[in-house]
Image (cartoon, rainbow, N blue to C red):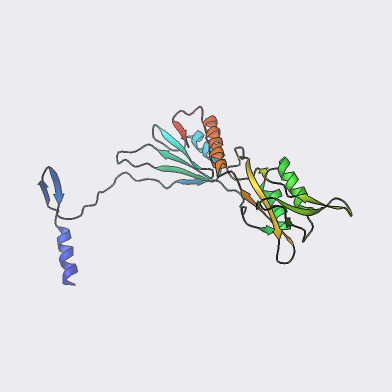
Amino acid sequence: MIKEALQYIVGLSRPELVEAGGSVYSDRPLKRVCHNPKADPIKMSTLAGLVDYIRAEIDQMSERMIVQVVSPLEVRLISQLDSDRIRETVVSVNAQVPEFEYGAYMGHEKFIIALQAKFLNTEDRGKLLSFAGTVENGSVTEYGDDGVTQKATVRTGVAGKKDDIVPNPVLLTPYRTFIEVEQPESSFIFRMKEGQGGGVMCAIFEADGGAWKNDAMENIREYLENELEEFPQFTVIS
């Protein structure tokens, strides 16, 4: 109790400042009182919402503002540096995209449904759906020793069957960024294997080294620059 009491009494006194070697020192830690509060960012999920907010000119902003494309899923509206060299995040936009387990094997039916629901309708998606939808259970085999090429027995009609090579690689366009911009197409490796119960398991693996992210961010930047062309106060960066 005595220790706490002494600390309280010492805290009531003004700090002593000492100048030495051209610098000023204090005999106790000091906390700067800030009179420049920051607002919590507005949270959004669409680029259109951000554009509408800027166009409405609801809030007072810095003379210059930055629209930063952080990733294919995130965009921020941030201010200039203030007198304390601090930026304010005014708006945070996070895209809502369907989840897909890349690199994970899933049941035959689940894979077909996910491919239809979470990918744009393209030529290779159609080929993949056609192939996956006609594969016979228990018919997937390795074809060669390169770890990629496979073959499977597919149904060709009411009673017809044939062995066919699993299509690889395939160009697919998943929903992976903001819906307002063009979804980037990229290369995938399609693999199949036998499940424990004898059913067919399917998976696709990303095969572009993440290049799609740069394409998506460029698409977002171009969209925002076009939509905010009449507002030179806002600079779009990525």
Q: Quadrant of residue 84?
A: top left
Front residue of 210 and 10: 210
| Left or right: 119 as drawn, with respect to 38 | right
The x, y position of residue 134, in whole percent, is 80, 53
Q: Quadrant of residue 171?
A: top right
Front residue of 85 and 120: 120
Residue drawn at x 39%, y 42% as measured from the top left: 88
Residue drawn at x 74%, y 57% as measured from the top left: 140
Query: Which quadrant, please, contains the N terminus?
Result: bottom left
The x, y position of residue 14, in whole percent, is 14, 54
Q: Can residue 201 be seen in this view?
A: no
Residue drawn at x 51%, y 28% as measured from the top left: 229
Q: In this view, does 232 lie above or below 35?
A: above
Q: Is residue 76 visible?
A: yes
| Left or right: 161 as drawn, with respect to 113 | right
The x, y position of residue 69, in whole percent, is 49, 39
| Left or right: 86 as drawn, with respect to 198 | left
Q: Quadrant of residue 199?
A: bottom right
The x, y position of residue 76, in whole percent, is 47, 42
